[in-house]
């Protein structure tokens, strides 16, 4: 008889001897199903507070709940800056996941089918992903800000069988298919396409799923290392989306990396503010705590005061965010009035961590864990831990335990191959960061051409430039695509930004390349002044005068071709839907 929860035989097979050589013993591959893992957690800690959905006041797509649920901390009842829309214990979450499996099966979802979630952050993104594992289906987390055209392009690529959509997303869906203008708020909406899919309204999903019986635990599959669990779309072209296919094993190994380096446990409390369509929000410790029975508070929309109150009231210990998110938290007026002493794991990634921000974080007791990760690695590339950078040194640290990272020598803008093998750079020589390991995706969804150009053997060509120092740590230099080519000279934006950041009065700076008829590209800087009197000169002088002074001050540290030839002074940087500074938005400022 097989034990459902261990996936190992209760008794050794006939003929097995404890004295047999290791090579003769039966080896059982782990079950990577997040649903089976959640069911085990529900046996261990059934009554622990598990999933919480919150949103800034009057901004949720879900109906608010009373804040006096016995599972919630008492302080939630007096919270002013957020509403609660969902609460569940570990056992209640497991029950909901099994009911979702029944819903998916009733609507024809089978192994390998895709199921998309398109809406603002919610606990349902996580529950749908876990339920998909119950059938061997694949979850697709879609950016809530996709236009109707972008949605059509992505769904043409992944061809989902079901889509769970928020209200705003449903309106855009109706724009793509005007003949199907019925609102999914009233129930399933069948929408004909090349590959038909049904649409369910996210706000009504709790009521919808309650009508289904829990799926039989005995019928749940064991998922091996090759089973694709999620497709996450990352930067592609306007006509060709780039969907990263991640197996459940990729996601699981990413989480093992996080456990060992961030040193957290299954009873941690985490807040999720990064978009769940972004790998940092989706797998950046989130999935691990969900299927191991921790407490995960999902924040539906970013508002600094809301996030700070959540950190305070729920005594949150860990959260991932891009640098912009942490900067806005530090600048919020309510920051100093909150008890944030429980928050011990500020995880930062998605963009370079400026030294000035690292210094501010250290000053308030938030020693940052600076992560270099990509969707293709399940977010686990390298990490600079606080103990590695006690004086806020810059860098991206060393590889996670189960990820291998090298710096490949370049030939032009591509890695040099000698007899079809990559060649490593010397210390401090800039090349392309490449990685391999069990958390690294084996490829992009149905894109043989992109797969062929993105891998050399097991090594993923990340498109990021960096170098290995003599002390064995890695430094990030630039995205290869963002390197500025001005008159044939290559300029790394971050290197220029570091110099400009030191100029008195400059609070933040971004450097981009903009098109130029003479030079091909020129170096352009976008500055945010200090709020203090020190930044007044940037706000009061014409930008032409600011540019002249910047060039004079920076010329002491930068070669002439690296000096900015254009400047804009702004109050804030344009950001993309995942909170990162938008390179396209910066370039638009100069048009």
Image (cartoon, grey):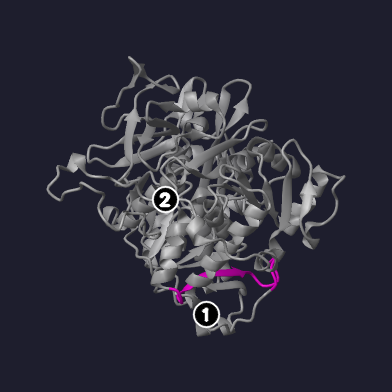
Specify which label sits upstream in the sequence, 2 or 1.
Answer: 2
Q: Is residue 112 above or below residue 85?
A: above
Q: Is residue 287 above or below residue 482?
A: below
Position of residue 500 in the picture relative to residue 417 (left or right): right
Per the rendered image, the range of residues in magenta is 46-63
Residue 409 lies, in percent from the top left, at 34, 24
Position of residue 378 in the picture relative to residue 242 (left or right): left
Q: CA distance from mark 2 to mark 1?
A: 30 Å
Residue at the (58%, 65%) spot, across then down: 214
Give the residue furthest to the left. Answer: 19
Q: Quadrant of residue 264?
A: bottom left
Does residue 57 belong to the magenta stretch? yes
Residue 182 lies, in percent from the top left, at 85, 54
Circle 2 residue: 32
Q: Quadrant of the N terminus?
A: bottom left
Give the residue furthest to the right. Answer: 179
Circle 1 residue: 72
Q: Is residue 414 above or below residue 22?
A: above
**In front here: 511 or 318?**
318
């Amino acid at each position: 008889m097989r034990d459902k929860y261990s996936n190992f035989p209760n008794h050794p097979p006939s003929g097995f001897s404890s004295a047999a050589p290791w090579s003769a013993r039966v080896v059982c591959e782990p079950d990577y199903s997040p649903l089976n893992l959640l069911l085990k957690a529900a046996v261990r800690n059934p009554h622990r507070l598990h999933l919480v959905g919150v949103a800034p006041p009057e901004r949720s797509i879900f109906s608010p709940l009373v804040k006096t649920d016995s599972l919630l901390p008492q302080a939630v009842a007096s919270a002013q800056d957020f509403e609660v829309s969902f609460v569940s214990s570990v056992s209640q979450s497991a029950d909901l996941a099994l009911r979702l499996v029944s819903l998916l099966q009733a609507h024809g979802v089978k192994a390998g089918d895709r199921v998309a979630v398109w809406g603002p952050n919610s606990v349902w993104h996580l529950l749908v992903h876990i339920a998909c594992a119950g059938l061997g289906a694949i979850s697709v987390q879609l950016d809530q800000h996709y236009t109707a055209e972008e949605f059509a392009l992505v769904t043409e690529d992944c061809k989902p069988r079901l889509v769970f959509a928020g209200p705003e997303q449903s309106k855009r869906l109706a724009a793509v298919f005007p003949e199907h203008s019925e609102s999914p708020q009233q129930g399933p909406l069948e929408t004909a396409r090349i590959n038909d899919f049904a649409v369910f309204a996210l706000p009504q999903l709790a009521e919808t799923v309650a009508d289904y019986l829990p799926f039989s635990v005995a019928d749940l599959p064991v998922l091996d290392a090759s089973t694709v669990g999620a497709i996450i779309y990352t930067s592609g072209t306007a006509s060709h989306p780039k969907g990263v296919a991640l197996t459940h094993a990729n996601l699981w190994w990413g989480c093992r990396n996080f456990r060992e380096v961030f040193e957290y446990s299954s009873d941690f409390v985490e807040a999720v503010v990064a978009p769940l369509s972004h790998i940092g929000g989706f797998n950046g410790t989130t999935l691990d705590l969900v299927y191991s029975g921790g407490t995960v508070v999902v924040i539906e929309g970013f508002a600094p005061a809301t996030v700070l109150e959540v950190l305070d009231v729920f005594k949150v210990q860990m959260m991932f965010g891009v640098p912009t998110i942490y900067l806005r938290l530090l600048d919020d007026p309510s920051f100093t009035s909150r008890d944030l002493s429980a928050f011990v794991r500020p995880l930062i990634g998605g963009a370079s961590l400026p030294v000035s921000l690292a210094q501010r974080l250290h000053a308030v007791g938030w020693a940052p864990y600076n992560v270099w990760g990509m969707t293709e690695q399940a977010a686990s590339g390298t990490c600079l831990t606080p103990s590695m950078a006690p004086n806020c040194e810059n860098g991206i640290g060393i590889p996670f335990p189960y990820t291998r990272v090298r710096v490949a020598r370049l030939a032009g803008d591509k890695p040099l191959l000698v007899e079809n093998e990559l060649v490593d750079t010397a210390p401090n020589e800039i090349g392309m960061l490449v990685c391999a390991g069990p958390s690294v995706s084996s490829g992009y969804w149905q894109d043989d051409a992109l797969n062929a150009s993105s891998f050399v053997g097991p090594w993923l060509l990340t498109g990021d430039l960096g170098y290995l120092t003599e002390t064995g740590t890695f430094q990030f230099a630039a995205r290869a695509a963002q390197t500025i080519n001005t008159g044939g000279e290559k300029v790394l934006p971050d290197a220029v930004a570091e110099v400009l950041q030191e100029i008195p009065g400059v609070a933040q700076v971004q450097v981009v390349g903009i098109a130029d008829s003479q030079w091909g590209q020129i170096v352009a800087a976008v500055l945010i002044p200090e709020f203090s009197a020190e930044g007044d000169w940037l706000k009061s002088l014409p930008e032409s005068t600011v540019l002249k002074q910047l060039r004079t001050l920076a010329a002491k540290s930068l070669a002439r071709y690296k000096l900015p030839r254009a400047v804009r002074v702004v109050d804030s940087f344009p950001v993309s839907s995942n909170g990162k500074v938008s390179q396209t938005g910066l370039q638009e400022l100069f048009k």
